Amino acid sequence: MQSTKLLRKIKDLKNKKAKLDRAGETDRELLIRLMIYKECKNSLNNKQKRILELYFESGYTQTEVADIIGKSASTVGNYVKAIREQFSYLIDNEQLPVTF
């Protein structure tokens, strides 16, 4: 499922960044991917950001997110779909369109 893939991608980016930080190293491609992630996240409205944080970053189910934010599970599902589409670049592309 695309949602699970996005969740893994976000966690993977953050874990790699943490490892590099601990080792005192940098990875330009990783930094660019994190910048893209942050730009995508910043383009979301507040409700979408909250759902991103709860569902994709924290791993709550759509039903749990719905209970937390006071919306129906189907509404949360619609938000999840929109977020997934917005972040499809992170999911679908292993290579960045940037030459180093």
Image: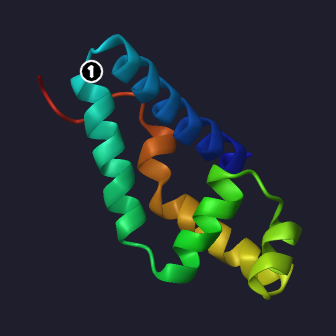
Q: Position of residue 41 (x, y in %)?
A: 42, 63
Q: Position of residue 66 (x, y in %)?
A: 81, 78
The N terminus sits in image quarter: top right
Query: What residue is rendered at 64% in x and 75% in y?
Result: 79
> Does the image show residue 50?
yes
| Residue at 59% from the left image edge and 63% from the top image edge | 52
Residue 18's quadrant in the figure? top left
Q: Report if residue 96 is visible in the image.
A: no
> At 58% across and 37% down in the image, what residue appears?
11
Residue nearer the viewer, 54 or 44: 54
Q: Residues within 10 Å of mark 1 (few under 14, many from 20)?
A: few
Above or below, 82 relative to 41: below
Q: Residue furthest left?
A: 100
- Residue 39, quarter of the rendered image: bottom left
Q: Please determine whether, in this image, residue 66 is positioned above or below residue 80.
A: below
Q: Residue furthest top?
A: 23
- The residue tagged 1 is 27
- Left or right, 72 with respect to 28, comes to right
Indicate the position of residue 23 as horizontal and vertical percent values: 35, 11
Residue 27 placement, left or right of 62: left
- Asked whether, in this view, residue 43 is left or right of residue 5, the answer is left
Residue 65, percent from left and from top: 78, 71
Q: Nearer the viewer, residue 41 or 91?
A: 41
Q: Up-down: is 70 above or below 19?
A: below
Q: Amino acid at mark 1?
A: Asp
Q: Residue at x 66, y 67 (%)?
A: 80
